[in-house]
Amino acid sequence: MSVAPDRLGAVDVTTIEPIERPEATALAAREVARFADALEALDADDWHRPTANTLWDVRAMAGHVLGMTETFTSLRHLVRDMRAAERLKGDGPQVDGLTAHQVAITAELTSRELVERLRSAGPRNARWRGRRRLLRLAPIKEHVPGNPPETWRIGYLVDIILTRDTWMHRSDLATATGRAMELTSDHDGRIVADAVAEWARRHRRPFVLELSGPAGGTFVHGEGGPSIAMDAVAFCRILSGRP
C-alpha cells in the first residue's frame, strides 16, 4: 500500500502481530507493577477522589484491581470468586458481581497493605495466567458495553483483556488525581497498538489514525478513509466507553 510522504512512519494495522505468550505474561507483570507504583505515589487525599467508574473512588478502584489480580492467581481463587460473583450479580452480568466482591473483600486493607499485596500478587498472577493450557480453550460469555454479549475464549481474557483492564484503570487513576501516567513505547505502545488492530478488525473500514504521546503512533488501514488525530490514551478511553 502506498503511504503519503507525511505518513512514512505509519504502520499498516494488518501487520501488527497479536500479543501471545510469553509476551503477554511479561506485559501483565509489568502493568500490575506500574499500577502499584502509581498507587504508591498517591497522597492521602488522592485515595478519596472520584473516578470515571462512577460507583468507585480511587480506593475502591484500587481494591478492584487488587481483587482481580488475586482472582487469577490460582484455580481455587478463581472458583471462589466466581461463586461469589454469581451470588452478588442479581439481574446484571456476572462481571458486576465479581467486581463488587473484589471491592468488598479488599475494603479493610490500609493503602500500604493494598500496595504490598498487589506487588506480591502481580508476578503470581502473570505466571498463572500464562500456564493454564486447557482452561484457555474454554468459552465464556462477556457483556461488552453498547454491543450484544460476545463469546470469548478464556485465553483471550487472560492474555489481553485483564492487562487492558489494569492499564485502563491506571489511566483512570491518572485522570482522577491529575498525576502523569507513566508511558513508554515498548510497553504502553504495544498495548495501544494491539487495541488499534482489534478495533480495525471489528469495523473493517479504512482510516489513518495518528495517536500522539509516548504510547502512540500512526496507523493505517486500507485506502480512502478518514484521518483521525488524538492522544493515544484518550483514544483508548473512548473505545472503552469512558467520558
Image: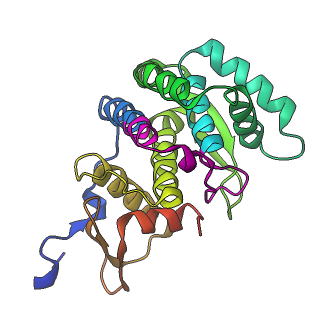
Left or right, residue 40 beside residue 73: left
Work out whether residue 185 or residue 13 is closer to the camera in this orientation and state it: 185
Q: Which residues are magenta?
A: 34-58
Q: Quick one: quadrant of the N terminus?
A: bottom left
* Any part of residue 83 in sight: yes
Work out whether residue 191 or residue 18 is closer to the camera in this orientation and state it: 191
Magenta stretch: includes residue 53 = yes
In which image quadrant can residue 40 be found?
top left
In which image quadrant can residue 51 be found?
bottom right
The x and y percentages for residue 239 are: 52, 65
Residue ID at (29%, 58%):
215
The x and y percentages for residue 45 are: 56, 49
Residue sticking out furthest to the front: 44
Residue ID at (36%, 50%):
191
The x and y percentages for residue 109 are: 63, 25
Residue ID at (76%, 39%):
94
Left or right, residue 27 beside residue 53: left
Q: Quick one: quadrant of the C terminus?
A: bottom right
The x and y percentages for residue 223 are: 30, 82
Work out whether residue 151 or residue 37 is closer to the camera in this orientation and state it: 37
Residue ID at (44%, 36%):
159
In this rendering, the answer to whether 223 lies above or below 20 is below
